[in-house]
Amino acid sequence: MAQQPMFALITGCSSGIGKDLAIAFAARGVTVLATARRTESLSDLTSHYDNIEALPLELGKPDSIEKLRDAVINRTGGHLDFLVNNAGTHYASTAVDLEIEEVAKLFEVNVFAVMRLCQIFVPLLRRAPRARIVQIGSVTRSIPVVWQAPYNASKAALSQYSKTLRLELKPLGIEVVEIVTGFVQSNILHHGLYAPENSLYLPIKSTVEDIKYRGNKNGMSPQAYATSVVTKLMRPCVNPEIWEGALARSLRFLVTFLPLQLLNWILFRRFKLDLVKAGLNDKTT
């Protein structure tokens, strides 16, 4: 009996990690169903790879997800081997300066849409001989990176959801793999750092920008990241968590073995939060 073709549905493929994940899967002979809000942004992929196809998806719209499910069923005959939840958005704000409306938008894309996608595609994944849900997470689920509390919270929520989902889907034969991502070169920081004019944290803004932009610039290339991740995902046995990207393994060591108090002390000094304290003292004298 001929082996049925393998299909991978990947969200957010117009650029960065998503684009290179699509290429890496396609290079392994998997038919990739690549999504983006505008399918024309995927023309570079579809013109160079016969086994990459473009489908529209707007994560913030539940009806768009339902239309995607119907399109995938029609294309695959009703089965799916990989659901790769890569698409996400970023909102860099301190915990006290955040705007709840923006946080709601962030969680809609980074958490709630992922929940909908997993829920709606489980029936298709059950029909594959070895199905895997792949969540593109972040080291910030464990590392409290200053000036991006909302983003950190969304990735922590995604991680805990994925851990629970992993247990609940085990009886159904579906694996859940979380990619705990370190620094990877991308344009995720293009929105910049949000801060009101009276923010107490302005004294450290340049420090945070330097750390984040330098880390992004010196991060792992998305091509190398995608190749490594997909190579591991295609193996018969895969770890439930894959730490990948620049500094990922070092940060894993820190959060695993360092006492929380010591980790917080290191981060306090790294982000020069003493400048915030000094600024407060200056205002009271």
Image (cartoon, grey):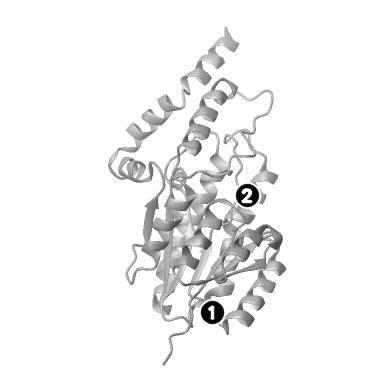
Q: Residue furthest bottom?
A: 1
Q: Gap between marks 2 and 1, in whole Å?
A: 27 Å
Q: Residue furthest top?
A: 285
Examine the rendering and report whether any part of residue 27 can be seen: yes
- Name the image quarter holding residue 178: bottom left
Mark linked to residue 106: 2
What amino acid type should be assigned to the residue bearing mark 2? Answer: Leu
Is 256 positioned to the left or the right of 202 in the image? Answer: left
Question: Residue visible at 55% across and 71% down?
Answer: 51
Is 179 positioned to the left or the right of 259 in the image? Answer: right
Question: Residue visible at 48% across and 75% down?
Answer: 81
Question: Residue visible at 46% across and 23% down?
Answer: 272
Above or below residue 16? Residue 219 is above
Q: Nearer the viewer, residue 68 or 216?
A: 216
Q: Residue furthest left?
A: 257
Q: Nearer the viewer, residue 266 or 34?
A: 34
Badge 2 local density, few (<14 within 10 Å), some, or many (20+)? many
Examine the rendering and report whether any part of residue 163 can be seen: no
Q: Nearer the viewer, mark 2 or mark 1?
A: 1
Pinpoint residue 14: horizontal percent, then vertical percent.
62, 56
Mark linked to residue 71: none
Could you say whether the residue bearing mark 2 is in a helix, strand or loop?
helix
Query: Mark 1 sits on what residue?
Result: 124
Pinpoint residue 28: horizontal percent, then vertical percent.
44, 68
The quadrant of the image that shows the C terminus is: top right
Q: Nearer the viewer, residue 137 or 166?
A: 137
- Name the image quarter holding residue 228: bottom left
What amino acid type should be assigned to the residue bearing mark 1? Answer: Leu
The quadrant of the image that shows the N terminus is: bottom left
- N-term-proximal mark, 2 vs 1: 2
Pinpoint residue 262: horizontal percent, then vertical percent.
33, 32
